[in-house]
């Protein structure tokens, strides 16, 4: 009966622990429960801890640095639970674990001091586990953290230099064992310096099965399950965080098939169907002829609970009777029952599993499967965060926002100066005409047009700020990356930051200034207002609300990078003074000055 487990290895993944000395100590105490109860019960061959082991944020959640107390808490959990004596604990750094870490040799690089794997491997590494029957599974941990690691927020996209790429390729070479890759960043969030991407590096090895990651935290609950099959042929699975969700993942490689289930901490029994396998998660070239025979003859289920399991029951589709599964192997958690796969050789079916332990805990699951080519596709909404390439997406967002900011100014300047465009206030006008009128007013005045245009172009070139990107280390922030400690670091999150600045401040500022000029021209066109119904009040409220928002952003930037970066911050701080000066210009300029700048203004008939 041991033949049921001779091609079986199961393991766990946990991600984004964010152990914090300021917030939610339950992350630590429940991690201790996980290392004691969960690992003692499931007895995995390995546990993959895929990054953000500590939080590294200060009490207000804005500033960031490494706190040794958080790493001591992490080490104490692993030590007191003796987890490294029970299983292989394979941890890797995340971006939070590299906040404010100037180099691998930095005294703040606590990963190397307190992490089981950090003491042995400064960055990426590999490890092979082998079961009692001699089957092996290779794990490759991918460390894509920035070096040096700036404080947040400009430390979000991972980066692999050529040396690290070569190291990863060497680890994966000359092995016939199935390879499980894991790291903190999804492949959609990793930059590489050469022609190859992390996806092509993983996909070029025929032994690659899956890439496991975290980092995106289910996008604040919008995408609770992120799974995909990349075009390069491997699966990519992002795991919800431990920080808020207390999730972990059980995976098994059984007779050439990878299966998994995501579990909330404390929910028992735990169930994983290893055959029939997930319909969309197929690993080519891993099944032997013996595996196929076994898969056609037996349903196989892994089941675990805190107390001995009493019943493992299974039925398929709308069958009325539950079929009892029997445990196999010595001290194994594998349960099997015979079936005839030919009865389900066509179409999509559902397998239902019910597990009960002697204390009355009950858990039921249902799972689709198919044995032919009618493979149900993964929901598109679960795939897009992993299939995109965020550096390109963020760059395009920034490019589009920048063009939307500067091109209208240039276009309507041309319209105003090189054509006989006539500003009209006669009767009702279409929305596009009213917009054109406002933009001509904004673009025609030199005192408004040149500062706005020059600043808009500056937003595309930088530098945006100069300050303490690392503790006691001045760095420069540009749209395409940051320069610190003599190194230029690519982090495409700068594009997202610039996009936010343009969309939430620069474009609204353009609109408010043009609206104020338009109201001034309407007063020339015999449209009179009292103090109470004056639209100036509304526009000025909008303007100072916008300044208040920008002021809050400056305070946030101060909390992140300090006073120097705030004072020498053209992107945020200086834009406030520019906006005030432009608002003053629109207030003091006369109607005659505007008419002279435009030339053609048609007066509204008072009748």
Image (cartoon, rainbow, N blue to C red):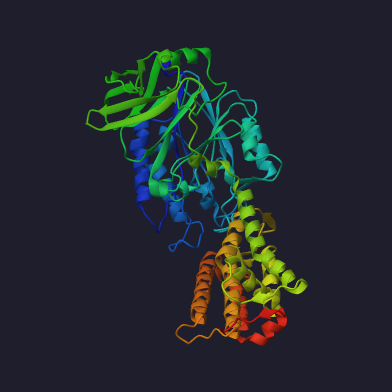
Q: Residue furthest front?
A: 607
Can you tell which quarter of the image residue 149 is in?
bottom right
- Find residue 91 and report its horizontal and vertical position in percent: 50, 41
Q: Nearer the viewer, residue 500 or 184?
A: 500
Residue at left offset 26%, top offset 28%: 356
20 shown above or below 308:
below
Q: Quadrant of the N terminus?
A: top left
How many numbered marks have been drawn onto this rendered protein structure? Answer: 0
Please indicate whether residue 428 sits to the left or right of residue 307 in the image.
right
Residue 148 visible in rendering: no
Q: Nearer the viewer, residue 96 or 451?
A: 451
- Find residue 450 and report its horizontal and vertical position in percent: 71, 75
585 shown above or below 225:
below
- Find residue 224 and report its horizontal and vertical position in percent: 43, 44
- Find residue 335 and report its horizontal and vertical position in percent: 35, 21
Residue at left offset 64%, top offset 76%: 424
Residue at left offset 59%, top offset 40%: 124
Can you tell which quarter of the image residue 249 is in?
top left
Q: Nearer the viewer, residue 120 or 564?
A: 564
Can you tell which quarter of the image residue 505 is in?
bottom right
Q: Residue furthest right?
A: 418
Q: Quadrant of the C terminus?
A: bottom right
53 shown above or below 419:
above
Please indicate whether residue 523 sits to the left or right of residue 60 in the image.
right
Residue 307 visible in rendering: yes
């Amino acid at each position: 009966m041991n033949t049921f487990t001779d091609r079986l290895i199961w393991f766990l993944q946990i991600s984004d622990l964010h152990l914090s000395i300021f917030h939610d100590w339950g992350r630590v105490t429940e991690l201790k429960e996980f290392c004691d109860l969960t690992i003692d019960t499931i007895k995995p061959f390995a546990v993959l801890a895929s990054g953000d082991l500590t939080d590294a944020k200060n009490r207000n959640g804005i500033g960031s640095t490494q706190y040794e107390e958080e790493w001591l808490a992490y080490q104490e959990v692993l030590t007191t639970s003796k987890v490294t004596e029970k299983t292989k604990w394979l941890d890797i750094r995340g971006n939070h674990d590299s906040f404010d870490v100037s180099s691998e040799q930095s005294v703040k690089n606590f990963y190397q001091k307190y992490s089981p794997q950090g003491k042995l491997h400064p960055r990426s590494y590999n490890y092979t586990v082998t079961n009692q029957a001699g089957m092996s599974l290779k794990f490759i941990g991918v460390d894509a953290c920035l070096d040096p690691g700036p404080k947040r927020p400009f430390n979000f996209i991972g980066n692999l230099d050529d040396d690290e790429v070569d190291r990863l390729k060497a680890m994966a070479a000359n092995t016939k064992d199935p390879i499980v890759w894991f790291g903190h960043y999804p492949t959609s969030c990793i930059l590489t310096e050469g022609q190859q991407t992390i996806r092509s590096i993983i996909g070029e090895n025929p032994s690659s099965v899956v890439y496991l990651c975290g980092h995106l935290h289910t996008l604040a609950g919008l995408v609770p399950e992120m799974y995909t099959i990349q075009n390069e042929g491997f699966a990519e699975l992002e795991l919800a965080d431990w920080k808020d969700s207390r999730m972990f993942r059980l995976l098994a490689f059984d007779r050439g098939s990878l299966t998994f289930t995501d579990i909330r901490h404390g929910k028992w029994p735990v169930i994983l169907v290893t055959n029939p396998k997930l319909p969309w998660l197929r690993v080519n070239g891993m099944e032997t002829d013996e595996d196929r025979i076994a898969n056609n003859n037996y349903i196989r289920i892994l089941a675990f609970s805190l107390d001995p399991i009493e019943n493992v029951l299974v039925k398929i589709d709308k069958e009325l009777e539950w079929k009892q599964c029997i445990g196999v192997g010595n001290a194994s958690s594998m349960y099997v029952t015979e079936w005839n796969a030919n009865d389900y050789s066509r179409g999509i079916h559902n397998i239902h599993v019910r597990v009960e332990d002697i204390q009355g805990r009950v858990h039921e699951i249902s799972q689709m499967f198919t044995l032919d080519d009618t493979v149900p596709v993964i929901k598109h909404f679960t795939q897009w965060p992993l299939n995109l390439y965020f550096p390109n997406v963020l760059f395009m967002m920034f490019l589009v926002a920048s063009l939307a900011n500067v091109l209208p100014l240039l276009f309507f300047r041309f319209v105003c100066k090189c054509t006989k465009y006539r500003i009209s206030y006669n009767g009702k006008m279409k929305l596009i005409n009213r917009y054109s009128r406002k933009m001509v007013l904004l673009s025609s005045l030199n005192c408004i047009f040149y500062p706005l245009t020059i600043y808009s172009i500056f937003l595309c070139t930088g530098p945006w700020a100069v300050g303490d990107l690392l503790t006691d280390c001045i760095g420069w922030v540009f749209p395409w990356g940051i320069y610190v400690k003599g190194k230029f670091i690519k982090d495409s999150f700068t594009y997202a930051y610039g996009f936010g600045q343009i969309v939430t401040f620069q474009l609204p500022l353009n609109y408010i200034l043009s609206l104020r000029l338009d109201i001034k021209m309407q007063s020339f066109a015999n449209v009179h207002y009292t103090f109470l119904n004056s639209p100036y009040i509304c526009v000025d409220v909008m303007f100072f609300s916008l300044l208040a928002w920008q002021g809050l952003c400056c305070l946030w930037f101060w909390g992140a990078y300090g006073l120097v970066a705030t004072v020498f911050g053209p992107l945020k701080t200086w834009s406030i003074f520019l906006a005030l000066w432009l608002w003053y210009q629109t207030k003091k300029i006369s109607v005659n000055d505007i008419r002279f700048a435009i030339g053609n203004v048609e007066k509204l008939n008072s009748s």
